[in-house]
Amino acid sequence: MSKADCVLRWFLALFFLAFLLTYALVSHAASVPMPDAEALLKRSDAFRNGWPAYVVNVKITTYEAGRSDEEHLYEVSQKGTDKTYVDFMSPREKGRHLLMLGDDMWVYLPDTSRPVRITPLERLTGDASNGDVARTNYAVDYSPVFLRNEKIGSVDCNVLELTAKRKGATYQRVVYWLRTEDARPMRAEFYLTSGKHIKSATFDEYQAYGGKTLLHKLTLYDEIRHDSHSVLEYSEATQRNLPDKLFYQGRADRF
Amino acid sequence: MKYGALISGFLLLAGACCTLAQDAASSEGGPVKTRYSVSVIDDATFYGNLREPLPTVLNQVLVEPSFGLRYQDRVSFSTSLIGLAGTYSDNYSQLRVKETYAGLSAGDFDFTAGRKMVRWGTGYAFTAAGVLDPPRNPTDPTDRLNLNEGRDMVKADWVKGPNAFTIAWSTAALAPANENLHDTTAFRYNVLVHGFDTSLIAGHDRGSDSFGGLTFTRVLGQAWEIHGEGMWRDQGAVLLGGKFTMHSGISFIGEFYTPPNTGYYRDMSVSPFAGRQHYAFFNASKTRLRELPGWKEWDVSGSIVANLDDHSDAGVFDVNRWFGNHFSSYLHLEIPHGSKTSDYGAAPYSTATSLGVRFQL
């Protein structure tokens, strides 16, 4: 065997080895399934909605220029994925109620003589919008698409892009970071129909309530007025048997 | 002296309410839930260019406690009172019952007895179909001093899925003597269908007319809400309205209302011979001017209401400013315009400016 043949054989052997190695790596990568975005979103909703029917208290503290500015208290009753009733508990809002039925929303103001129908734009009013408090079942409101894997600090996350699929959705588009390990929400960016990035959120703390791990603290950052943010603290989440008539829009005799 | 008694009463009541609230807090999650609220308003109204020999300033202090109790989501009791002390041509004080009623829930049925405010009309400044509603005042549609009172009634509601049936009987026996009320029996069917919140209303006023009508509200797209009412009571009354909300949070409300000139619908200042009336209302408002640095606690609203037949109108401007969570102050300015015999021009002043402070607990 000539020296040239020997070199050629070694070259072919190395080439074959490299080919096998590359093939193995590529086939392994191809065999890793893309995450099921729908399933991930449904799992993530379970961290915000522990039971089919429940009541939770929400305290919203708004900060302006790093200073605590005002506090609002709400009692949120939710049944299924499309019925929410919010009782405003702060002195300055006492007597107000917000009702969401599917895509429709009403606010009951004690100083007007009728329940007022809310347009989708009005869902965005307030430091934390009505929609932030009342619509927490993203799997119902949005169609998810898996975007990429990404780390937040040292935590591996799946990043989803959510697009509104019904008019009752609070935002047109949401980019949503979910912890790879358990689909726990970690971070979100919220966009309007115009494409404007209006808010960001960090899901800061989780706590155990009635054997479930549920969201305890969420911070919403105003991306238009950068010196403002709101902290939403959830407490006393309790499974409750809520009657359908609590969610009836014609019921003016609210407690 | 009367003010002193009123304030003492308020303090006693507030103390009692706080005690009850603490009791309720200690039984969190228990079968009994209580709620309370108290508001105190000190209001001064200055009348400009009075055409009659009347005092130019009306001072009023209002104490408005509310208390509600619910037992096992089954039995409820609610009361809301108004203590009013005023100084105008003479001093006066009144105790009014805004609402006091008991409720019982049994399955899909809710029963209510007592004085209660119901809101069947969908109009903001006017109502054609709100047969049991408190009266709408287009120059004060939000009832800024919370002086509206309910009707004395027995009511039964049956709610099944998206359908709700209500039957109510209301007596006029306890209504103030100056109110043109009759005993009323009314039925309402309410359903949400294809986004239309729709109600059919029918009934009869004892010794007066039978009536029937329809109300609806609907949201269109991102920013529009439309509402309307039609009622036949001897003749037809129609209301059509809409609300538009901008991205900035500024809201516009417009309404057109045409009632027949019959005893039931006629405004006191309108001649019985004037024929059918036509009204237009327009309002622009913004709560919390947060886009302007330092103006976050301010709410502003401006309205104009016009009688299109006698060409009279009234402009209304409201400003409200919050100080923390419990205190607010406000300015309410009303400027009527028109001939002395017209609907809005008949007001005996050229301007009415109200200034006040409000405490809410």
Image (spheres, coloured by chain):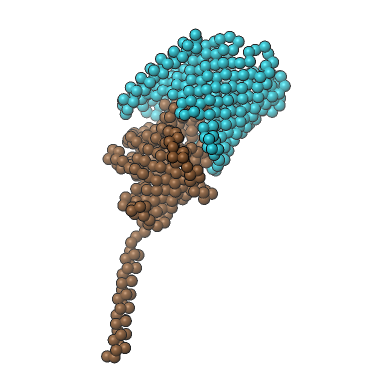
- At horizontal 39% and vertical 35% (from top left) the residue drawn is A59
- State which quarter of the image contains the N terminus of chain A: bottom left
Rendered view: B332 above or below A16: above
Q: Position of residue B310 (x, y in %)?
A: 71, 25
- At horizontal 44% and vertical 27% (from top left) the residue drawn is A91
Task: Choose top left, top right, bottom left or bottom right for residue B340.
Answer: top right
Q: Position of residue A180 (x, y in %)?
A: 33, 53
- State which quarter of the image contains the C terminus of chain A: top left
Q: Residue furthest bottom?
A: A2
Q: Position of residue B292 (x, y in %)?
A: 55, 38
Q: From the viewer's perspective, is A34 left or right of B149?
A: left
- At horizontal 31% and vertical 25% (from top left) the residue drawn is B27
> In brown, which chain?
A
Q: How many marks?
A: 0
> In cyan, which chain?
B
Look at the image and tell me whether residue B212 can be seen: no
Rendered view: A222 above or below A94: below
Rendered view: B181 above or below B313: above
Residue situated in front as seen by the camera: B1 or A9: B1
Look at the image and tell me whether residue B81 can be seen: yes
Q: From the viewer's perspective, is A182 left or right of B177?
A: left
Residue situated in front as seen by the camera: B120 or A90: A90
Q: Position of residue A209 (x, y in %)?
A: 30, 38
Task: Choose top left, top right, bottom left or bottom right for residue B80.
Answer: top left
- At horizontal 63% and vertical 24% (from top left) the residue drawn is B334
